[in-house]
Image: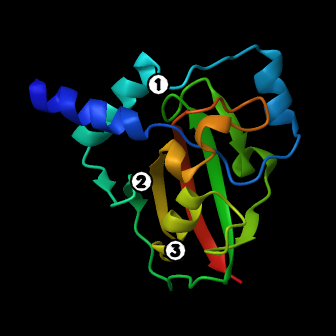
Amino acid sequence: MKKTLAIAAAVTLLAGGGVAALSMNSDRRTFVQKGLAVAGGSAASLLSVQQAVADDYKATGSGLKYKVTTEGTGAKPKAGDYVQTQYTGWLDDFESEKKFNSSRDRGRPFSFRVGTGQVIKGWDEAFLDMQVGERRNIIIPSALGYGDRGAGGIIPGGATLYFDVELLAIQ
């Protein structure tokens, strides 16, 4: 019990995050219209982090946590490569009602130059370590996202973000 609380407390200190690219779209408007407000460091986030530790998520030195859900067989991108991705992002937990963005819902992959700061640090770190065809669940702490400032009135400061990401191609 003490070990679980210590892990949860340490991860809570790192909690928070953001998204790579915020643009106005129907997903965000729907999110706002429903009045879904989230406080960073909520009990739900703490429970999600504890669950992640229990579910064999790997943790990197930066605090990023991930779990490979589909193994990739292709190449790994290098910093500066353009990558084509699919993703869905949530607040509080994977599959929560607080989905804030999804390229899958739009039916359009998202492309960016990896490792160059075009996206949040957590995304750069995760995608630089993935192979084409790989899909992961990633948990991004605020230090690798938007920190205390949040983003777009949708992502509160200090919020942990949960993404289901997939590396489709290196362009």
Label 1 sits on what residue type? Answer: Gly
The image quadrant that residue 100 belongs to is top right
From the viewer's perspective, is 15 left or right of 127?
Answer: left
Q: Which residue is mark 1?
A: 41
Secondary structure at numbered mark 1 = loop
Secondary structure at numbered mark 2 = loop
As measured in the structure, the alpha-carbon distance from the residue carrying label 2 to the one carrying label 3 is 13 Å
Where residue 49 appears, as percent x and y from the top left, is 35, 34
Going 56% across and 85% down the picture, which residue do you hit? 78
Disc ID at residue 128: 3
Q: Is residue 140 above or below residue 127?
A: above
Q: Is residue 27 above or below residue 97?
A: below
Q: Which dot, 3 or 1, sits closer to the camera? A: 1
Q: Which residue is mark 2?
A: 64
Label 3 sits on what residue type? Answer: Leu
Residue closest to the far top: 35
As measured in the structure, the alpha-carbon distance from the residue carrying label 3 to the one carrying label 1 is 28 Å
Where residue 44 appears, as percent x and y from the top left, is 43, 20
Where residue 33 appears, as percent x and y from the top left, is 83, 17
Q: Reading the chain from its start, which is encountered first: label 2 or label 3? A: 2
Where residue 93 appears, as percent x and y from the top left, is 48, 31
User: If the image is split into quadrants, where does the N terminus sit?
Assistant: top left
Q: Is residue 113 above or below residue 65?
A: below
Label 2 sits on what residue type? Answer: Leu
Q: Nearer the viewer, residue 169 or 141?
A: 141
As measured in the structure, the alpha-carbon distance from the residue carrying label 1 to the one carrying label 2 is 16 Å
